[in-house]
Image (cartoon, rainbow, N blue to C red):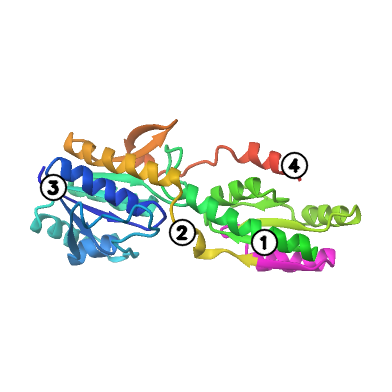
Amino acid sequence: MKRIAVLTRDCAGINACIRSVVRTASLYEIEVMGIFHGYRGLIDGEFTFLNRRSVSGIINLGGTILKTSRCHEFQTESGQKKAISTIKDNNIEGLIVIGGNGSLTGARILYHRYHIPVIGIAATIDNDVNGIDLTIGADTAINVALDALDKIRDTATSLERIFVVEVMGRECGYIGLHTALAGGCEEVLLPEKDFDIDTMCREIKEGNAKGKISWIIIVAEGKASAHDIARIITEKTKLETRTVVLGHIQRGGRPTAKDRIMAARLGKYAVELLINGKSGRCAGINNDRLIHIPLDNAIKPKRLEELDEYYKLIKILT
């Protein structure tokens, strides 16, 4: 193998992973082509050669130096065939895809339908890649959300108000659940769990009658809108409620030590998997061990294993 390419989505730790891929490939005298703008760049031929010097000083940067974008054209057969032509025209012998379910689904298509040697690396703030304990970017996202939450709590306590804080998580409540527990929140609303807003409002009124002066409620974006929840709380409790939508702040920021170390390990591992003839696999970490699983398994829905235990703990500690 003499030339591979790498494409990415975006979250903290991606650049550290790119750096690891490039420097490991350099050790084996393999050229690395960086693909700009994800699958769109693969279709349009937006490439740059990466070497040890070009990835210097990026280990601490959030986002991705290769940029990224969604590509609806790649979902079509004609778009896929353009991508395959680009791969062949540029003598790319292997591809590393760093991202979440969408990116890994694209990698699976390239492997199964067109027999392109490909390794995926699990990287997404939602930590929703099946069969993987922790994905690159998830730890940083929680810590970014937690930092914001700590500041919101100062205001909530000082002003004696209820705050409803909306975090990312359209289909997976990982960020919401972990932020709520680590941040000492009173309630969390998640896509995976039913909730009774009347019961929640009754608990707020009962707590207020006993002298509890502030509440923080985490809402995952896939469950409800923070503004809608706050409006209902105010209507039912007559207590002043404020909202904060953290939004894309959770996708950025300097990666934590855990994400940088995981990215370094997985970048090296992915290159060596390709060298050893492995393909159609997703690289990840389980029980702090490097593993690779079929892409078919990685893109299946993932259950939030700790949901019941953590939610009960949140309510006990309220």
Range of residues picked out in magenta: 221-243
Q: Earlier in the sequence, mark 4 or mark 1?
A: 1
Looking at the rendered structure, the secondary structure element under dot 1 is: helix
Marks 1 and 3, Cα distance to the nearest angstrom? 50 Å
Marks 3 and 2, Cα distance to the nearest angstrom? 33 Å
Q: Residue 18: give x, y in percent of width and height.
A: 28, 51
Front in this rendered view, residue 168 or 216: 216
Dots 1, 3 in contact, CB < 8 A? no
Q: Is residue 155 magenta?
A: no
Q: As displayed, is residue 75 above or below residue 118?
A: below
Please name the amino acid that badge 2 sits on.
Answer: Gly
Dots 1, 2 in contact, CB < 8 A? no
Using the image, tell me which numbered label, if any, was put on residue 152.
1
Question: Which-is-in-front pick, marks 1 and 3?
Answer: 1
Tell me the residue that label 3 is attached to. Answer: 93
Marks 4 and 2, Cα distance to the nearest angstrom? 30 Å
Q: Earlier in the sequence, mark 1 or mark 3?
A: 3
Q: Residue at x 51, y 59 (%)?
A: 250
Tell me the residue that label 2 is attached to. Answer: 253
Looking at the rendered structure, the secondary structure element under dot 2 is: loop
Front in this rendered view, residue 32 or 308: 32
Q: Earlier in the sequence, mark 1 or mark 2?
A: 1
Q: Residue at x 77, y 60 (%)?
A: 157
Please name the amino acid that badge 3 sits on.
Answer: Glu
Q: Residue at x 22, y 37 (%)?
A: 272
Dots 4, 1 in contact, CB < 8 A? no
